[in-house]
Amino acid sequence: MIGTGNDGNAQGVDLDQVQDQVKTLFKNIPNNISLVLFTTPGVNDVFANACRQVIRAFRELSPRIDLKEFDTGHKEAKKRGITQSPTLLINPDTYNIKWYGAPVGEESKTFAEAVIIAGYGETGMGSEAAKVLSRIKEKRDIKVFVSPTCPYCPQQAVNALKAAIMRPDIISLEIIDIQANQDLARKYEAQSVPQVYANEKLIAMGAQPEELFMSSLEKMEQQSVYIPEDDAEEVEADLVVIGGGPAGLTAGIYGARSGLNTVIIEKDSLGGQIASTPSVENFPGLTQIGGKALVDLMVSHALEYVKIYPGEEVMKIEPGEPAVVVTNRRKFKTKTVLLATGARHRHLDVPGENSLSGHGVSYCSTCDGPIFKGKKVIMAGGGDSAVTEALHLNNIGVDVTLVHRRDKLRAQDHLVKKLEENQIPVIYNAEITEITGKGKVEKVNLFHNDTKKKSSIKADGVFISIGYSPSVELAKQTGVELTDDGYIKHDEKHRTNIKGIYSAGDVEGGYKQIVTAAGHGSEAALAIFEDLVNPYWKKEDK
């Protein structure tokens, strides 16, 4: 059970009830689903067995799922051009969908979506995305590179699945697990996931809302902004929370529990930075928990109280009574707005960082770490996040060296102790000045601050964890004042200079901790409730 009652005691989600709902959903699938698995004995047996186990588990949920298995040397494999083991086909007589690897970990969600979409014959694609997809007239051969440890991959893989199922006449899809298919990952230099290729051209890196994915697929290059052709649904609310990290999710819970009609909008994956954190060890009540697992608990709790609009990007905020929040899909009319937009990874801003991003340069060890097993990488940074990620990489078999610009790490003592216990080398007083390589990371150039000398290290990858920059673009666009450090300026009630607009979490600066962000979220929501009961701006206007 998770959740918080009026007295602070645990209550809420009935996991048995959720499981019953899932079972009912699969049990009532109306259409037959044909799965065809191709394997080669002795090749990727671990993945092949995992694939069988996952399919067996899903077949127990629905009698509509049928499985056939062939050797990759069988004529059926030659007929369908199958050479990789394992390869899973979904309704191959209707769709051209190939899954190279096993749908385990985060990708089990993608597989569940695929079964439901194929079984019910409905993709659930939004009208705007469907319009873009309908404009594509030429063939698209899509490759989506994913990893079972990547929390952002299912969103992008499901986007591609929807496209392949809606337009089987012109769209083929290959979902490629980089852990099971390191040869293909090397060929396409896909060392960071998710990555999407169409007709052998890289069109997207990272997760996207479905409209942006379809737009990238149409234009054959990554799109960063999507403007809807016409207005969609209009939603009325008391509080619109922009951001689905710990501050935003907590604010949503407290806002709704105060009686406010509250909604949460999140353009990326829910959970913010936590979703890609390998391990959280300082959250009260939980000695140790994976970042994504903690996010799932928070999201499940929030969904008891509020409606969440994932995959929607806020384009602008029009302050007023009511304020208008315009996303890429609809308009929200609201009494108040809470900016909980968080922060994003800070970059080194050195030559080679951008050009090799996704080709050895990464900001997420959880997502991309497994592809570097047995290889040498550099971890840039010296704080809690950098050390935590270095320990995670070391734990999964990556040869990692930490590079820190100062003579002492900023991480907590117990993390530093773990680093020493695992004999992870640290290069102190050094800064990365350049990352080089032809198509992928091959070498890292360093400048040593103490000796003023230069050196180079051969490396297969560079993971960067040097802190975060606040995501304040929307705040600046709206006219919200910022501090000298670039964070949102606010008072003790989390009010900004604009009436009815508040802030919470990492976007305000201060300690970058999950509990701090959650605390700020609850404070802001309670302050908003009090202000709506007794508006401070009306007192000021007298």
Image (spheres, rainbow, N blue to C red):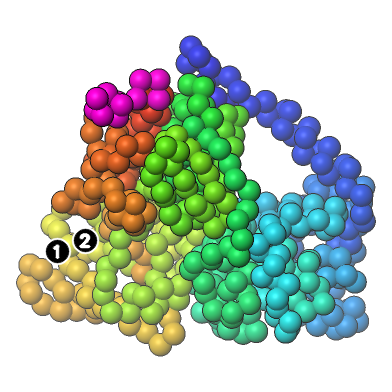
Q: Nearer the viewer, residue 219 or 85?
A: 219
Q: Is residue 538 magenta?
A: yes
**How much space separates mark 2 and mark 1, taking CA atoms?**
6 Å
Mark 2 or 1, nearer chain start: 2
Residue found at x 63% / y 69%: 214
Name of the residue lying farthest toward the bottom: 438
Q: Quadrant of residue 128?
A: bottom right
In the image, 252: left or right of 68?
left
In the image, 540: left or right of 178?
left
In the image, which residues are magenta?
532-542
Q: Quadrant of residue 303?
A: top right
Q: Which residue is mark 2?
A: 404
Say which quadrant the C terminus sits in. Answer: top left
Q: Is residue 11 magenta?
A: no
Looking at the rendered structure, the secondary structure element under dot 1 is loop
Relative to 493, residue 214 above or below: below
Q: Position of residue 91 (x, y in %)?
A: 86, 65
Q: Position of residue 377 (x, y in %)?
A: 37, 69
Looking at the rendered structure, the secondary structure element under dot 2 is loop
Q: Residues within 10 Å of mark 2 (few under 14, many from 20)?
A: many
Relative to 234, residue 350 above or below: below
Name of the residue lying farthest toward the top: 7
Residue found at x 46% / y 26%: 254
Name of the residue lying farthest toward the front: 542
The secondary structure that most of the magenta stretch takes on is helix
Residue found at x 45% / y 34%: 335
Relative to 145, residue 456 above or below: below
Q: Which residue is mark 1?
A: 429
Q: Position of residue 540 (x, y in %)?
A: 24, 28
